Amino acid sequence: AVAQAQHTLRELVELLQARGTRVDYAIHPVAGRMPGHMNVLLAEAQVPYEQLVEMDEINGEFKHTDVVLVVGANDVVNPAARTTPSAPIYGMPILDVDQAQQVVFLKRSMRPGFAGIENELLFDPRTTLLFGDAKESLTKLLAAAKAL
């Protein structure tokens, strides 16, 4: 939300879809400054509503997913919510992106999320970290994809 990357993300998705890639948007219900915030930003970028998949529907699909691109999330994708009983987020529903074959995680830094704990996903060998501003990082990804 801060980077205003939704338009660049939509452009990247359109390129991938034109090449035959299936793309869905998974949004945690409390992502953003208020519930529904991310849905509004994606609607502003003219992302088709039918591509937005509810957490309960998408979680079972991650284990069959080749690549997940995480943009601007932290606690809502942290496996500690399932694996670490002492974590303040333990028991919180999360997007199970850690079950995908590969995760590309766009982050500004290694700082913890709102819960103040490290995200276990950042240390998973299947996770690639791409540091920087989300819009700038997505612009680089888009340029690389166009060059292929």
Image (tube, rainbow, N blue to C red):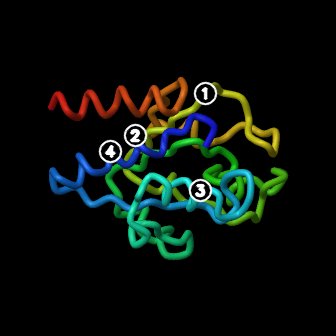
Question: Residue tagged by mark 1?
Answer: 108
Q: Position of residue 73 (x, y in %)?
A: 61, 45
Instruction: Locate residue 145: give its quadrant.
Output: top left
Residue at the location (49% across, 39% down)?
5
Q: Residues within 10 Å of mark 1 (few under 14, many from 20)?
A: some
**Is tag 4's residue or tag 1's residue first in the polypeptide sequence?**
4
Kindly check if marks 1 and 3 are in contact, taking CB atoms under 8 A apart as contact: no
Question: Residue tagged by mark 3?
Answer: 38
Q: Position of residue 4 (x, y in %)?
A: 54, 39
Question: Residue tagged by mark 2?
Answer: 8
Kindly check if marks 1 and 2 are in contact, taking CB atoms under 8 A apart as contact: no
Q: Residues within 10 Å of mark 2 (few under 14, many from 20)?
A: many
Q: Residues within 10 Å of mark 3 (few under 14, many from 20)?
A: some
Kindly check if marks 2 and 4 are in contact, taking CB atoms under 8 A apart as contact: yes
**Is tag 1's residue or tag 2's residue first in the polypeptide sequence?**
2
56 relative to 137, above or below: below
> Mark 3 is on which residue type?
Met
- Dot 3: element: helix
Kindly check if marks 3 and 4 are in contact, taking CB atoms under 8 A apart as contact: no
- Dot 4: element: helix
Side of 138 relative to 94 (left or right): left
Residue at the location (34% across, 31% down)?
141
| Quarter in which the N terminus is drawn | top right
| Quarter in which the C terminus is drawn | top left
> Mark 4 is on which residue type?
Glu
